[in-house]
Image (cartoon, grey):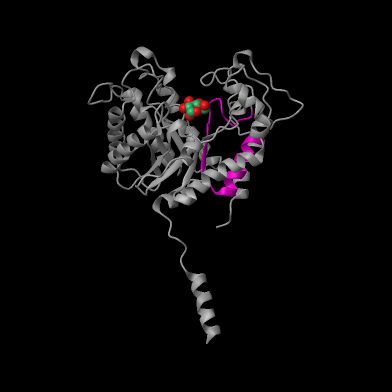
Amino acid sequence: MKIKLILVLILFLCFVPAQPQSVAQKRAGRMEAGMNLSYLDNYWLGTKEKKFADFVKVSDVAKREKMFADIAKAGFKTVRIPINFGAWASLKPPYEWENKEGPEAADLFVKWALANDLNVIIDLHHTELDNSIPGAATTERIVSLWKRIAERYKNTDREKVFFELRNEPHDISAADWRAQAEQLIKTVRAVAPNHTLIVGFHDWNSRQALIDSKPFPDTNIIYTFHYYDPFIFTHQGATWSSEGLPELKNVPFPWSKDAKIQTPPIAKGKWIENQINSYQKDSAGEKMFADLKAAKEWAEKNKVPSFLGEFGSFNKYAALDARCRHAEIIYSSLGKLNIPSAWWEWDGGFNMFEPGTTKIADCMRKAIESYAAQKPVE
Ligand code: GLC
């Protein structure tokens, strides 16, 4: 009798259904390794007098059709499209489109992504432009942008099209961002109840902000974070970020006792110098894995999916082999932790190409492959 009971119990335990996956978890499970295709975010190519609305060039849009095919052919399953919708709407209510070419270019990007069977993330990027245009990024204006964007794409395939509410909110407190995000969620939900949203947190979608935050009540959300650590490696030479970075070069990866990093005089006593001092520890693979694991643990604890929406390294001064080592540590960690991602970026300064070509470098290919190789078998 006892044996029978034990047998029944064992059978029961074997067949108890695993926790059912949420819609967001299922969709996140199909994102895999993805790619950011920048261009519709490059507002700085426009003129300030026109509030940058004129940055989109029809010929540049057209030449990107092939890139979607190339991205799919390279094995990426998802494309994240950063789009500066904010440049094309008026500054005053009712915030109508002043420039139609911009949103029409976004439509084409979405169409081309779907034609290549890619998941596609419509990402509202750089609403604050260069911070010099008053009123560009008020909550009221961003809400209105989302009303228009959600209307525009509400009939797209909800299994494949994702709405990312705001890239890298910064200079906004955690509480203020949360309040704004809640309004954006409500706005989109009124128009597109079934599309999956992608939402990150304050402080530039940082990993720490994710860990310090709570998910929203809406269950159809994937939580994003960005990971550019160690920053002095990934952003050496970058002109748009911290003081001292444009002059910083020859940062190896990982740290090596034979390659002394020179602190640019302008960075003395600043954040960059601190980063140089802690670089030996910060560039260790175990440290990077632990960082990513902490993000995954947050998602598991909250029973929500997570997504690494941006990572990569700038190719101005960083050597290709070092960039590949850095990429492989992240891709293999993402594989082990089963976190989908999007590399920054396909064809700008963070690209994966063999210098001077549009062919993915062999060592980058090896890094990408480490993702699938490390992924747990389902
Ligand atoms: C962010 C910025 C983008 C920049 C990238 C790397 O996504 O929006 O302009 O190139 O980070 O710094």
* Residue 346 is a magenta residue: yes
Q: Nearer the viewer, residue 278 or 322?
A: 278
Question: In which image quadrant can residue 21 be found?
Answer: bottom left
Query: Residue 321 at what x, y percent from top left?
Result: 68, 31
**Quadrant showing the C terminus:** bottom right
Residue range corresponding to the magenta coloring: 325-354
At x 26% / y 42%, what residue is drawn? 190
- Residue 361, percent across and down? 64, 33
Q: Is residue 272 left or right of residue 112?
A: right
Q: Quadrant of residue 376?
A: bottom right
When asked about the image quadrant of residue 171, the answer is top left
Residue in the foreground of this view, choosing between 317 and 1: 1
- Residue lying furthest right: 258
Residue 365 seen from this side: no
Magenta highlight on residue 234: no
Give the x, y percent position of residue 175.
37, 35
User: Of 113 and 85, which appears nearest the observer?
Assistant: 85
Judged from this view, the residue extending furthest toward the front is 269
Residue occupying the point 35% across, 32% down: 176
On the question of residue 15 being in view, the answer is: yes
Between 23 and 77, the one lying in front of the other is 23
Residue 365 falls left or right of residue 178: right
Q: Position of residue 57 (x, y in %)?
A: 41, 21
Q: Going 39% across and 52% down the picture, which residue do you hit?
A: 23
Q: Is residue 79 above or below residue 98?
A: below
